[in-house]
Image (spheres, coloured by chain):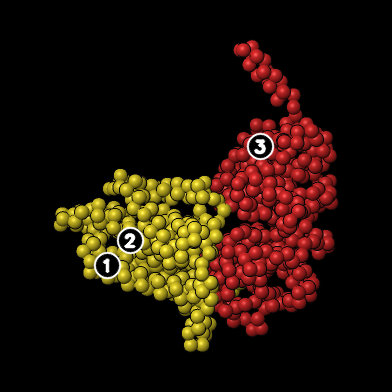
Chain colours: A yellow, B red
Amino acid sequence: MDIAIQQAVNALALGGTYAMLALGLAVVFSVMRMINFAHGELMTASGYAYAFAIAAGFPFALALVAGIAAAVALVLLLERVAFRPLRGASPTSLLITSFAVAVVLQTLFQSLISPRPQPAPMPDFLGRAIGIGDFLIGSIQFTSIIVTLMMLAGLAILFRFTMIGISIRAASMDFPMTRLMGVRANRVIAMAFAISGLLAGVSGLLWVAQRGSVDPMMGFLPVLKAFICAVLGGLGSLPGAVLGGFVLGIIETALQAGLPIEWAVFKDPIALFIVIAILAVRPRGLLPTRVASRA
Amino acid sequence: MRHIIAMAAGLLLVQTAAAEDLKIGAAVSMTGGLAYADVPAIEGLQVAIDEINAAGGIDGKYMVEIDIRDGRSDPAQTTLVAQELIASGIDILITPADADPSIGAGLIAAQAKVPAFTTVASSPTLPLSAGEYMFGNFPGDNLQSAVSAQYARDTGYDTAFILYSEDSSYTQLPLYFKEVFEGLGGKVSGEAVYNLGQQDFSAIVTTIGSLDPAPDVIMTAAYEPDFPAFIRQLRASGVNIPVIGSDGIDSPTTFSLGDVAEGVVFSTAGFAEEGNPLSTFYKAYEKKFNRPSETIYTALGYDIMQVIAAAIMKAGSTDGAALRDAISGLENVQGAAGSITYAGREDRMPLRDVTLVRVKGGDREFVRQETPPGDLVPKPKY
């Protein structure tokens, strides 16, 4: 029983990280109709900024801020330089552009920083266990669950009660109509990118806290998982992305814990097979957007 | 004046044509997933080339030049640039730190009778799969596990848990460990499989923590970023079982992990001590690149050049077939990381020292260094 609870906590922590990543992709997709494959490189950038700030002797809290700020600044720069000129272009062009941006950033990290992983030391308390009742929870997991819940709650408030949040939701349903209502497209899109940068920065730091180092290629895998979660939840749907993240987290943890060793190599294919099975029944995802995509 | 320049230029031309050159072609990964290993290895190789050329070349006549082309960690691209390099007339080919891109390049090299070395791949099956001219350089996975399993038994560990990944040949090293460990009377009481790049080890950690009785030691060949993620999550869940790793974690990250990595023992290719060849090499490296070496891979790159130089001295020429036979007969070549022997090694993997290092207070502590007896080293697994 204890093990079951422990594994449930594991699933929640992993799912939460996926949820934040998927939400970052979904918020940009909802206004731009673009899956930003450079999202992972934003995580890498936040990791590098954190690692350099620590190496330069900044206190832990300030280094965290530097990490998040780097991701937000980079995504705003990318929006201005790479994505704005392509606004309204076909989804294929946008997709390929974001891939290109991801590769350019990876190569820049490799040649300007180092192809070797850079250590990103975290305070020792993140390597300890916290006792709740008579069972232990890893402090990284605990932190990631708390941070995820705070981020999701904060974004829920933003999307529900603030002008800019409502504009983003409106734009995700019908962009031309939203503009006719007097909402400035540049502002909405830049804000959506900034939110995705914030999510990438926070999840990048949680990712780095788990792995202890930053390397140029580290963004690829998480963005792939996030993409799967976003599709699973219903592409473009914000609550769907969050749900998709938790569902994938639960599937992966259950397979890792439950599969016999001879089957363990097939963990990822089985997880993807389950995702495909879900999509076969619900082709538009678990929580599809209400308005059909015009793309 | 013009005449003098023309004459000088002419003389220079004659000079270069007259001196015998050794051309090394490196079809390695300067970018992509293998760059973390190939870039430092090639840097180390360049330190060796500078030294040799400053001393007037190998045997006083062969000046060394190197042509580096990026295979981008991609097997197809690596094979392509290897082909270009061989067409340009190189004498030695250097291939990447992993089996997949090395095999294609190695097969082409074998056809052209050009000896080839992988930078730091440690899979003992690689040279046999990549043509008659392919040689390993790093202490093989089976060699490393012979030393670490012997150490585990000597320390009194009777049961072990192994964590491995079938995604690459290297991460299956714990299976060699299992063979030696059980051969020495120990027992592997549990196993788990992970995927490369897997961030989340919580489910595996929960499984290990619930084992009753708990294993005496955990052995894994996971490396960055998997290893730091695993060890953090392991320690954070309150499991304090000792951990043995392998050379993939010989990197600054491991020493920056703080409390969680304390006491981890891993196998690697050498240990730097004031005045020993490795520390002398590290000084030369720092002088050339103005930064300290981050990994022992630099020293292993340097060692490839020592092997090549010894083989040329022995063969007395740069003829491919003669060189290959010379390399196969080399014994006790002194490299930066230790001495290197190819003689009698049918798998063309070097017999060389394996060092065990313990992480202590964010630094390395010497545990033991030895070349394992040949009968303790498991046969390569396909």
Q: Report the amino acid beneath label 3.
A: Ile
User: Would you name the residue on which mark 3 appears?
Assistant: B66
Q: Are marks 3 and 1 in contact (CB under 8 Å)?
A: no
User: Would you name the residue on which mark 1 appears?
Assistant: A158
User: Would you name the residue on which mark 2 appears?
Assistant: A195
Left or right side of A93 for B338: right
Q: Are marks 2 and 1 in contact (CB under 8 Å)?
A: yes
- Residue at the image point whose x is 79% and y is 75% from the top: B185
Mark pair 2, 1: CA separation: 10 Å
Q: Which of disc 1 and disc 2 is earlier in sequence?
A: 1
Mark pair 2, 3: CA separation: 48 Å
Residue A198 lies in quadrant: bottom left
Crowd around label 1: few <14 · some 14–19 · many ≥20 (10 Å)? some
Q: Report the amino acid beneath label 2.
A: Ile
Q: What is the tally of numbered marks visible in this picture?
A: 3
Left or right side of A121 for B61: right
Location of residue A294 with respect to A255 vertically, above or below: above
Secondary structure found at label 2: helix
Instruction: Give x and y (percent) for residue A24.
Output: 36, 61
Instruction: Give x and y (percent) for residue B305.
Output: 73, 43
